[in-house]
């Protein structure tokens, strides 16, 4: 498998995801500077976390308008899997590749901590390393992770099995206390229609190494390698 | 020419900031505060001197970048 | 002379001199050096260079007493940050700095720009920052401003560090009414560099280009006193000095661009523009290099129109750097900065005149010899009076609590002891994916990227001890940092300090300063823990009411194998719990005395530095030998609190069975120094090792899950407290305080 | 009654957001964009019907909560 990680000015989890991918893939992904004209051929495109363009105006808005994203959208439409983590998720919603928006956290504060999320489906390239219904511990670190969509859209996403992860308690119950940011229906990650694009707020790359206190995030990268060869 | 852009959330869209402000105002003892909505106000200096062209340009800026038209409305005013 | 400078020619009035903070004697000295009157720009430059902040005029003589050397020290105080060798061809670069006053005026921006400034000090030297820390002191929780200040400062520190993408991993927070009018915001950054790629600030090479990079210059934070003089500018309302606003996004770009350029051979010298911006950076670079510097101020990128030379030289706009390049490398550098979309301008050159010459509008607007600006800066041996000694507090004179368990819970829910989770969850403490020990332990640990080694980092100071006895307090601050690193098995390397005090012109304040320095120096020497960088913040005083003397210590230690780091919390039932070190039940200046008896009196616990060293070296050896499953030092609140913290942080409870030979409450709550708690499966081996080095050690109990699995803490004479109750109590106060209506 | 509050940065205060927006507009090909300043626009529903009282209340809200008067200015307009 070949992977590309897009680096925007202000990305700051690019190296973290590079390390996690290298660990799972056995070789490093290609790091692509947003200004590079060519997006190399890849089996997976990753938009990393961070504060692209300072997250000024709206998180992800300026990154979504950068030239390289036109190419990313194009590839995504051709079926190339795209993974957006945190700021990458925000950028994907801004481009319209993923539905909904990520608003300011309900308590208006940045939040960095481990959360439990429930894997809603294992039938995708991103989640095939997990069992459906499994709960995993993954860190979050964001100011704007409050997933919002109107009820019709939420119903549709649920109907089409496009909710990837939900915030739950360790037993897998979707409680209000387990929701760290006010997200609608405790949604932590969503797919596009063909389930080839995933955006999620939690950072699987931050717990993909036992030395960091856990490796629940690693199955996501291992699963991708498994699925994409 | 100066353009003034107001960007506001569409009705019905969740506004965590507005909600938090309303709550905080209540806590500070301000009575009778109903709904609060927070939006953005952007002022842009333009080299353009033709009002129609300026309006078109700023509208395009809003569509492309300044507003997320899925959840936000915008209005453009031009100064002198 | 440019129009604006000429306007002020011959108009250096006594009032203007005073507004620039000069004494009559200082101004006479300037006239003597120049042999003429300075113009306004020159006066401004002198005022900045001779300010307390830049010249250390009240502290210099005292700071010389601190030990600054060790075989592993590569660079001690005097550069942007200290540098120590950490092996494998790498160096650790670190420093701490205060942003107290700005944070009181505007907590979010004040704290944010404090983080920005200290980050630049570290990456200026060629290091990639890997950890941020913050030592915070606020006024009484009941003071009307405190909540607003806590909220703003914490949000500001997070807002800046999170965006730049450096984890904020440790720190401290205290509350005391002495800080009501003067909060302390001390920020520390730790970075890692290649040992043979450290960058310094000494300019060199006559004819070499001087380059300005980063953000544009605005009228931020310009010397308030002068700007207040009305005749200064016609539209003075518009030009009012403003609080500096930070732009962490630009900082991130500047960081990446500088590191990218540093990988080439283009840079001769580099210096960030911190306090006093272009003035101190250009003067310090030329003074250190023994060269002259000529700048064309018309070339400085500015953000506002009509800026005078005075304003350009004194602006404190953030996210800027000054560099001297090798000849012909301008284009290489320009390309890097343009890639990162940052301003880049060649604004001058290095000369052989030994003078700082500034031009604007084609004319010379300032022409000063560099050497006296730095070398002739005033230095004061301010009068000082030692703090009066305090009486020792006898345990027998302090009423014991009914059930010590209730006293423990009171302490755990008190502002100075409760969990700081509410703070650190607003900080991205995991970005860079190397934080192997997160906030909440004695020290945090960041892995050295790509290796199994780690850097342990902590900040410590107990101001209530420092006010009670500055010498003991100074010792204790250093010893506690050393102990916190040791508890994780780290080898302590060196410290940075942030000396926060009141008005040095008052002899009792100067006495506190002198005492703290003396204690720190002794501790640094005995513990082989030299000072490699630091910062002094005086005049933390409002209406004659000074803060508690607060010499914050930032400590850095090295861990050879992160796999060996013991946990803070108890890991498994049925292990022995051992107390290392001597305890006499010292209640003077303790938290028990303050929180439960409403008394802040008494001599603080003495620090026996030799005993401290023996105990620490023992513990570090035990950790290395794999004998220790959990380890925690004893500090605020004493033995009982430390036990509670180990139960809270762990997987199991603790049953304490030892019967103390001293009054129970003194045993449980005394704050005797130099002590650790360990959990081990092999107590005999530990006891034997302790005997061999003449360190007192005894088994005081065992870990257990309790009769109903409630993982309780059970102590003699006290009711058992479940882990859940301990946790809930510990977590309660701060969020409740911050989020109550 | 509806109150409309504009909160803007004082002159001379750095506006990193505005700067970034200006930059992004340039990258998107909009020519002739000079200074851009971003502020907040807050709409508040008030139970108060007396205009003077409403203005006083909203001014107090700005001073106490809505604006950071060290670096920001505010203006209050009342609707019908
Ligand atoms: N401002 C802060 N930022 C990050 N972490 C903090 C802060 N204040 C306290 N902490 C963390 O909380 C824990 C407890 O702090 P403290 O009681 O000062 O520790 P100790 O007594 O071991 O020095 C430590 O891990 C410390 O790093
Ligand atoms: Mg400790």
Image: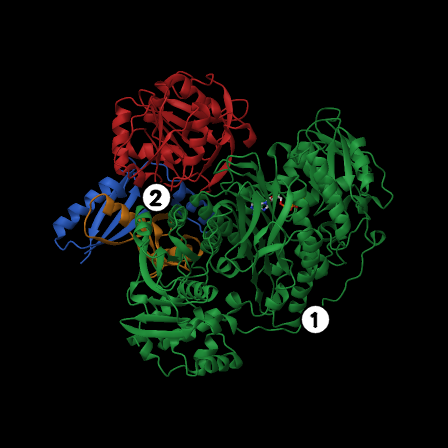
Chain colours: A red, B blue, C green, D orange
Q: Is residue A133 left or right of residue C722?
A: left
Q: Are marks 1 and 2 in contact (CB under 8 Å)?
A: no
| Viewer-side residue, A149 vs C8 | C8
| Viewer-side residue, C483 vs C659 | C483
Mark carried by residue C596: none
Q: Residues within 10 Å of mark 2 (few under 14, many from 20)?
A: many
Q: Residue furthest right?
A: C661
Q: Position of residue A227 (x, y in %)?
A: 39, 17
Q: Quadrant of residue C324?
A: bottom left
Residue A157 lies, with reference to residue C214, above or below; the image says above
Q: Position of residue C650 (x, y in %)?
A: 66, 32
Q: Which residue is mark 2?
A: A53
Residue at x 62%, y 48% (from the top left corner): C493
| Viewer-side residue, C83 vs C297 | C83
Q: Position of residue C37 (x, y in %)?
A: 41, 82
| Viewer-side residue, C558 vs C141 | C558
Q: Which residue is mark 1?
A: C385
Q: Quadrant of residue C309?
A: bottom left
Residue D1 seen by the camera? no
Q: Is residue D80 left or right of residue C275?
A: left
Q: For numbered disc 1, what is the local secondary structure?
A: loop
Q: Position of residue B39 (x, y in %)?
A: 33, 46
Residue A158 lies, with reference to residue C268, above or below; the image says above
């Amino acid at each position: 498998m070949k992977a590309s990680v897009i680096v925007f000015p202000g990305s700051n989890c690019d190296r973290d995801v590079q390390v996690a991918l290298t660990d799972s893939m056995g070789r490093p992904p290609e790091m692509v500077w947003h200004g590079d004209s060519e997006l190399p051929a890849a089996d997976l495109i990753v938009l990393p976390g961070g504060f692209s363009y300072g997250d000024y105006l709206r998180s992800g808005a300026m990154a979504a308008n950068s030239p390289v994203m036109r190419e990313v959208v194009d590839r995504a439409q051709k079926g190339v899997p795209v993974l957006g983590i945190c700021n990458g998720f925000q950028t994907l919603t801004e481009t319209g590749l993923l539905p909904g928006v990520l608003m300011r956290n309900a308590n208006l504060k940045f939040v960095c901590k481990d959360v439990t999320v429930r894997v809603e489906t294992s039938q995708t390239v991103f989640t095939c390393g997990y069992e459906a219904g499994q709960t995993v511990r993954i860190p979050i670190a964001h100011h704007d992770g409050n997933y919002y969509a109107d009820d019709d859209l939420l119903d549709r996403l649920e109907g089409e099995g496009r909710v990837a992860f939900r915030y739950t308690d360790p037993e897998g119950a979707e409680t209000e206390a387990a929701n760290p940011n006010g997200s609608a229906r405790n949604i932590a990650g969503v797919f596009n229609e063909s389930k080839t694009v995933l955006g999620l707020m939690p950072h699987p790359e931050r717990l993909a190494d036992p030395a960091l206190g856990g490796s629940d995030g690693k199955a996501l990268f291992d699963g991708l390698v498994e699925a994409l060869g | 020419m100066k353009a003034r852009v107001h960007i506001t959330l569409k009705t019905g869209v969740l506004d965590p900031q507005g909600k938090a402000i309303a709550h905080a105002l209540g806590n500070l003892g301000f009575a009778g505060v109903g709904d609060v909505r927070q939006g953005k106000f952007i002022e842009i200096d333009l080299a353009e001197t033709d009002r129609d062209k300026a309006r078109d340009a700023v509208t395009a800026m809003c569509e492309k970048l300044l507003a997320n038209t899925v959840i936000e409305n915008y209005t453009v005013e031009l100064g002198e | 002379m440019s129009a604006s400078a000429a306007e002020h020619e011959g108009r250096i009035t006594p009032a203007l001199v005073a507004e620039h903070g000069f004494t009559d004697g200082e101004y006479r000295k300037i006239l003597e050096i120049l042999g003429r009157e300075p113009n306004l720009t020159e006066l401004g430059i002198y005022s900045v260079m001779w300010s307390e902040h830049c010249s250390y005029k009240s502290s210099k003589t005292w700071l010389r007493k601190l030990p600054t050397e060790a075989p592993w020290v590569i660079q001690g105080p005097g550069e942007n940050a200290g540098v120590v060798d950490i092996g494998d061809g790498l160096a650790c670069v670190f420093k701490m700095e205060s942003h107290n006053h700005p944070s009181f005026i505007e907590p979010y921006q004040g704290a944010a720009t404090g983080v920005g400034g200290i980050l630049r000090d570290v990456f200026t030297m060629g290091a990639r920052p890997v950890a941020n820390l913050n030592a915070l002191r606020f006024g009484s929780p009941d003071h009307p401003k405190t909540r607003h200040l806590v909220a703003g400062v914490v949000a500001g520190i997070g807002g800046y560090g999170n965006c730049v993408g450096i984890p904020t991993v440790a720190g401290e927070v205290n509350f005391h009414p002495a800080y009501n009018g003067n909060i302390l915001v001390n920020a520390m950054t730790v970075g890692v560099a290649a040992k043979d790629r450290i960058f310094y600030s000494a300019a060199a090479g006559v004819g070499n280009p001087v380059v300005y990079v980063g953000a544009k210059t605005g009228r931020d934070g310009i010397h308030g006193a002068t700007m207040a003089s009305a005749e200064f500018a016609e539209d003075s309302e518009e030009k009012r000095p403003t609080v500096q606003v930070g732009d962490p996004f630009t900082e991130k770009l500047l960081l990446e661009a500088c590191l990218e350029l540093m990988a080439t051979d283009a840079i001769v010298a580099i210096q960030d523009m911190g306090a006093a911006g272009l003035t101190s950076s250009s003067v310090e670079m030329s003074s250190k290099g023994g060269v002259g510097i000529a700048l064309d101020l018309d070339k400085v990128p500015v953000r506002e129109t009509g800026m005078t030379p005075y304003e350009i030289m004194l602006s404190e706009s953030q996210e800027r750097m000054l560099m001297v390049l090798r000849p012909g490398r301008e284009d290489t550098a320009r390309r890097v900065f343009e890639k990162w979309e940052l301003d880049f301008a060649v604004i001058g050159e290095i000369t052989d005149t030994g003078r700082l010459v500034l031009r604007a509008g084609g004319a010379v607007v300032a022409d000063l010899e560099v050497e006296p600006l730095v070398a002739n800066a005033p230095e004061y041996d301010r009068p000082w009076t030692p703090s009066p000694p305090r009486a020792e507090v006898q345990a027998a004179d302090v009423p014991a609590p009914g059930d010590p368990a209730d006293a423990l819970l009171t302490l755990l829910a008190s502002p100075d002891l409760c969990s700081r989770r509410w703070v650190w969850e607003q900080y991205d403490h995991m970005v860079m994916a190397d934080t192997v020990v997160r906030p909440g332990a004695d020290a945090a640990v960041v892995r050295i990227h790509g290796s199994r080694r780690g850097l342990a980092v902590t900040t410590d100071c107990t101001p209530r001890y420092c006010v009670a006895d500055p010498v003991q307090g100074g010792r204790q601050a250093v010893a506690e940092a050393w102990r916190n690193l040791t508890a994780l098995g780290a080898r302590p390397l060196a410290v940075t300090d942030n000396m926060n005090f009141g008005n040095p012109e008052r002899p009792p304040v100067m006495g506190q300063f002198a005492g703290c320095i003396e204690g720190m120096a002794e501790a640094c020497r005995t513990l082989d823990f030299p000072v490699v960088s630091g910062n002094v913040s005086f005049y933390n005083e409002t209406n004659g009411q000074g803060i508690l003397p607060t010499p914050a210590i930032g400590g850095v230690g090295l861990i050879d194998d992160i796999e060996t780091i013991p946990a803070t919390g108890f890991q498994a039932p049925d292990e022995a719990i051992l107390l290392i070190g001597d305890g006499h039940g010292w209640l003077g200046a303790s938290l028990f005395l303050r929180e439960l008896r409403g008394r802040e009196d008494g001599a603080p616990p003495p620090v026996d530095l030799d005993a401290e060293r023996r105990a620490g070296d023992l513990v570090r050896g035990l950790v290395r030998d794999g004998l220790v499953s959990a380890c925690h030092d004893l500090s605020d609140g004493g033995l009982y609190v430390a036990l509670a913290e180990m139960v809270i942080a762990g997987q199991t409870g603790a049953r304490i069975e030892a019967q103390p030979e001293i009054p129970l409450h003194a045993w449980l709550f005394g704050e005797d120094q130099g002590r650790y708690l360990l959990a081990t499966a092999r107590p005999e081996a530990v006891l034997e090792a302790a005997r061999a080095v003449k360190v007192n050690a005894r088994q005081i109990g065992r870990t257990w899950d309790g009769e109903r699995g409630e993982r309780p803490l059970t102590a003699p004479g006290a009711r058992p407290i479940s882990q859940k109750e301990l946790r809930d109590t510990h977590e309660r106060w701060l969020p409740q305080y911050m989020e109550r209506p």
